[in-house]
Amino acid sequence: MYFYPVLNVKACLMIDIIEEYSEAEELADFVATGFEFDENQFGCTAYIDSPANENLNFRTFDNLNEKIDLSEFGEGVTKILFAFIAFNPKLSPHKQVIEYLPNHKEVNISLELDYENFINATSEAAVQMMKDLYLKGLRALLLFNIRDFDMEGLIEAVEQALEEERAA
């Protein structure tokens, strides 16, 4: 398993591959400390069981925190964590989740990429798949009717930021 963590960075940034973990406890300790990030921040990670796309350029998501301040859309959400899942569906230990934790004002989204297409995709196509899935996850949050938060405005801002990144 390949795990791309984000550790206290002011960006939605995938960093170097962490070696495969064989000890569940060791991985749990790592995950528990790996998802800490400041308020009004985006966080992003990926669980990928194939090294096929290990050299992906994840800069597409690097600048979300620099371009978008969650507090500008209200007080209902202060953190958004997104996890991409690219595991063989028959073997995946990960579940898809879209949840809003109102007491913490946090959003957690874990969604599966199309495994076969993702592992065989070019880096550019894989990043586009990730962008599309990211936006799909944010759009699903509209169903939560989160109080004191302009989710539609956030989605528009993220779409624009991702489009600007593509043009750069």
Image: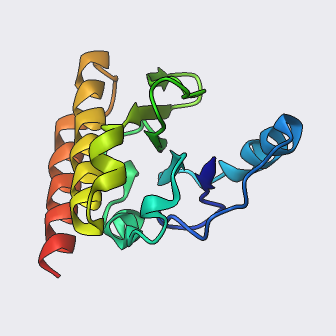
The residue depicted at 17 percent of the width and 82 percent of the height is 168
Q: Quadrant of residue 64?
A: bottom left
Q: Find the residue positioned furthest to the bottom.
A: 168
The residue depicted at 55 percent of the width and 27 percent of the height is 91
Please say if 96 is above or below 26. above
- The image position of residue 45, as x and y in percent, is 52, 51
- The image position of residue 15, as x and y in percent, is 57, 69
The residue depicted at 82 percent of the width and 44 percent of the height is 22
The residue depicted at 11 percent of the width and 77 percent of the height is 167
Question: Number of marks in the image?
Answer: 0
> Front-most of 118 and 78?
118
- The image position of residue 24, as x and y in percent, is 82, 35
From this viewpoint, is residue 114 visible? Answer: yes
Q: Quadrant of residue 89?
A: top left
Q: Quadrant of residue 55?
A: bottom left
Please say if 12 is above or below 133. below
In this rendering, position of residue 66 left or right of residue 28: left
